[in-house]
Image (spheres, grey):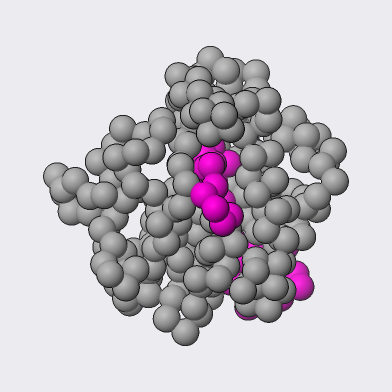
Amino acid sequence: MPARRAAASTLSDTAMVLAAGLGMRMRPLTLTTPKPLVPVAGRALIDHILDALNEAGIARAVVNVHYLAGQVEDHVARRPAPKVLVSDERDRLLDNGGGVKKALPLIGENRPRAPFFVLNSDSFWIDGPRPNLERMAEAFDPERMDLLMLVAASSSATGYDGIGDYLMDADGRLQRRGERQVVPFVYAGVIIIKPSLFEDTPDVFSLNLLFDRAQANGRLYGLRLDGHWLHVGTPEAIGLAEAKIAQSVR
């Protein structure tokens, strides 16, 4: 099923883009520029994400703001598509889970029960033959899944030097790594999630709470990224990402 049909029939037409972080690891660049607006390969980080949503047929995106919020608001207001709505967290930073929860009325304005995309704004990817958001929309099965996570091979990702986040079985179920365990997959900053998972949650919390709840119920699944994942968390990672992008278009 193409992503445009999937977005219309199964998923919400609105996605959430997380852009309210302080960008501490990206300093000194973020002393005057919010992290989502740091340029990589001629485009602001957040534009790489919004472009992918637009190509996937997602009509609207909710972007949360906190640090240097006015710059982010002004930037996304100039985009023709997708239509961007702002969720204002100037007064209180809510962590990623709380930020999504606060934005639920905007996300679910048209279809309050529909699963929706949530994307980080500090990482993106080079697609393989098929766009990864299209693959995720096709793979999401609400009968089996509460949450579908895009995962990347940790050994080959650009800008990432950790020991992975998850194991994945042959059916796609994910299990978080144990203490001192090295695992093959890292969370690539994109999920499809059911809004019902936000019931009975605090105002400020991490999405990890919902990842663990879905795993405990056997309803946390992963889809391996087809292409190459670019994690742009530090100034040094910008050059690495740009070199990989340049290599991919030769």
**In which quadrant is the C terminus drawn?**
top right
Q: Residue furthest front?
A: 250
The x, y position of residue 239, in whole percent, is 50, 20
Rendered view: 59 above or below 198? above
Does the stretch in magenta take in 50? no
Would residue 94 be found to the left or right of residue 226 on screen? right
Residue visible at 68% across and 25% down? 42
Specify the quadrant of the image occupied by residue 71.
Answer: top right
Give, as a single range, the part of the protein colored magenta: 104-131
Rendered view: 170 above or below 250? below
The x, y position of residue 162, in whole percent, is 29, 37
In the rendered image, is residue 241 in sight?
no
Would residue 229 be found to the left or right of residue 15 on screen? left
The x, y position of residue 61, in whole percent, is 71, 54
Q: Which of the two residues, 219 or 20, is positioned nearer the viewer here?
A: 219
Residue visible at 47% across and 46% down? 227
Would residue 30 be found to the left or right of residue 209 on screen? right
Specify the quadrant of the image occupied by residue 159.
Answer: top left
Counting labels gives 0
Rendered view: 4 above or below 181? below
Residue visible at 28% across and 69% down? 170
Q: Residue furthest top?
A: 28
Q: Which of the two residues, 250 or 87, is positioned nearer the viewer here?
A: 250
Residue visible at 68% across and 30% down? 43
Does the stretch in magenta take in 110? yes
**In which quadrant is the N terminus drawn?**
bottom right
The x, y position of residue 118, in whole percent, is 57, 56
In the rendered image, is residue 184 in sight?
yes
Q: Residue furthest left?
A: 180
